[in-house]
Image: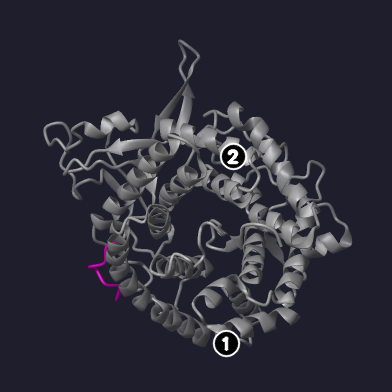
Amino acid sequence: MKATFDRFWASYKSRMSGHTHSEDRFSERKALHIDNLDTLWIMGLTRDFEQAVTALTDYDFAPKDKIITMADTARHLNSLVSAYDMTFCKDGRLLSAAVQLGNMLYTFFDTPNRMPVTHWNSTKAMDGDIQETTQHSTVADLTSCNLAFTRLSQLTGHMRFYDTTTHITNILASQQNSTKIPGLWPSTINPATADFTTDNTFTPDTLTHTHLAQMSQLLHHHTSTPQTSMLQTATEATIRDILFRPVTPTNESILAASSAYTIVLPKTQTRQVTLTHNITASSCSLGGSLALSAALSNGDDKARLLTYARLVTQGCIWTLFHAPPSSSPSSSSQPTNVRMMPQVFSMLACSSAALDNMDEDCSFDPTVWRKQEYPGFEVVFDARKLVRPEVIQSVFYMWRLTGERKWLNVAWEMWESVDKLVRTVDGHARDDEEMRMVVQTLKYFYLVFSSPSELSLDEWVIGNDGHAFRVGGA
């Protein structure tokens, strides 16, 4: 796995070095080196790591006349703080760069209601021009820097970073039970008015469940935090209103996570939750967050939540191993025999996610439903083969938190397909997003087969973008 990453990274560097005459391309190369600092360290590529750290000394984090997004900036901050936490000598250059970037990111929140500007213009900021908060964003955008800000306050003692995350957390908490699905936050929110309750659509990858679990883990030494109670509420709402048991040809006991919307029934004026049964590959991180929620819970509920984590993760594995064949648009030479989950698809619903329903017969009945071209998949909307980290991320958590060796066997089966696909990409990712997904996927595979002491979950929190932070003090 290290060899695959090394080959992919070397090919990428070679491709980028031929474009250093372009300022944008050169900035892209530096940015991606920052984004992958911790991966280079974990993989033992110390020479590349040192070169990337050295490049930080002349890197301008606030380029002139350029719009930068909060999500991209937060991801770079996550990488800097993570790399600092990992290095044995606590390289001061990394912390200095993190503080510099953190200070810049802090200005994103300089708005009347302290909701961040998600697309920030450094020139306007320097000239003192007002930058308006967008009316359409996601909770994921607003919380993208919470882990790094919290850790940065722990490392530096500058509480302004953590105060920013606390402000957003308090607003989330105050509105959690007032949304269209109480306990969950919708797909779209309005930071300009700080209204997170209006939208009636919900998707598993925008529920903020994973973020709450990670924040609870980072602050776990505190017995009572807002994130802990919010996580419990969101977990139960997710199980009740987002998960369902799908119909499969072989009556599998698995669960899937669907997008949903709400409608108000005319006669009773009551609100009804309707599942679309549409599933995205990105939703498969939910299995890992449920497993982490189980590890953070106390008492009898731990076993129940771990059961749900297992069923959701097994659902994603089933769809991955039984996916319809396709070819990736990035190359006509893509192998056709790799097993990779479709990007967007739907499945027929058999029952709710209640554990009592796991004994029901959910086999496909040809007398009730029309024949499916790909058994188990009602409709495949997007069958592209892309290397994504979400399934192996959940397998990583299941392995680390249960110690069940079957997860290693599953991971190896998955790896055989991922390795084939990465070899064909060979550093020629179509865009930054594909590059990030490939690197993050390889990182999780590497960690699955590493010693459990490598980024032990007792000592480390791993964020949504794969960057890890040490639990505890400075």
Give the x, y percent position of residue 381.
Answer: 33, 50
Q: In front of the other: label 1 or label 2?
A: 2
Q: Is residue 89 left or right of residue 368?
A: right
Pointer 1: what residue?
47
Position in image of residue 346 (x %, y %): 32, 43
Where's residue 102, x and y in %?
A: 75, 62
Quadrant of image for the N terminus? bottom left
Q: Tell me where residue 279 sits by quadrant.
A: top left
Magenta part, dominant SS: loop
Is 151 placed above or below 194 here? below
The magenta segment is 332-339
Magenta stretch containing residue 7, yes or no?
no
Q: Does residue 285 appear anywhere in the picture?
A: yes
Q: Which residue is mark 2?
A: 228
Residue type at mark 1 is Arg
Residue positioned 36% across, 67% down in the render: 329
Quarter of the image where the C terminus is located: bottom right
Q: Looking at the rendering, which quadrant does residue 265 occupy?
A: top left
